[in-house]
Amino acid sequence: MADIYLTKDGYEKLKEELAKLNREKNDLSAEINEAREQGDLKENAGYIYGKEKQSLVMKRINEIELNLRSAKIVDDMQVNRDQVRLGATVTMRDEGTSATLIYTFSSSDEADPGAGRISVSSPLAQGLLGSTAGKTVAVKLPSGEKRLTVLKVEYK
């Protein structure tokens, strides 16, 4: 099984999601039992919906438990803090538009592009990994190639 790299925040968020899903699982069990008492299970929409929802919740619980068991906390690891790596917040300039971009590189479980957190598996991150401040990199994206200059690499 491959190691999963997470920041401390990401690890805590997964633990919170697991606790929420376990509560939801218990609530669903009660709903399923109530629906079961209503009679014929083949035509009982509440029972069928509850079982389907329970299956999805259980699948996600298993995924999270597996990720937490194999998680390595990147904040505790010794990494070269001059280079773009998992956990880095990178300030860069798009050389084509002169726009300044700021992204934090996270695991896929923690990624939230709207909040400025992108997965290290994304094409943008893959093109920047290992770069240092001052370096200009040509990154191949689905929309075409972009030239980005790394202005600052921080680990918060």
Image (cartoon, rainbow, N blue to C red):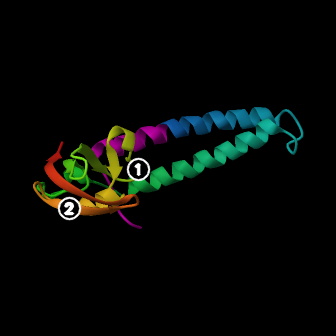
> Would you say 4 lies left or right of 79 here?
right
Residue 126 picture location, percent across and down: 30, 62
Crowding at dot 2, Cα within 10 Å, few <14 / some 14-19 / many 20+, comes out as some
Residue 110 vs residue 135, the one in the foreground:
135
Dot 1 lies on which element? loop
Q: Name the front one of labels 2 and 1.
A: 2
From this view, report whether residue 34 is shown above or below residue 110.
above
The residue wearing badge 1 is: 109
Dot 2 lies on which element? strand
Range drawn in magenta: 1-19
Q: Residue placed farthest to the bottom in the image?
A: 1
Give the quarter of the image for residue 2.
bottom left
Give the quarter of the image for residue 57.
top right
Q: Residue at x 34, y 49 (%)?
A: 118
Residue 35 picture location, percent across and down: 79, 34
Residue 144 vs residue 17, the one in the foreground:
144
Q: Which amino acid, mark 2?
A: Val
Rendered image: mark on residue 137: 2
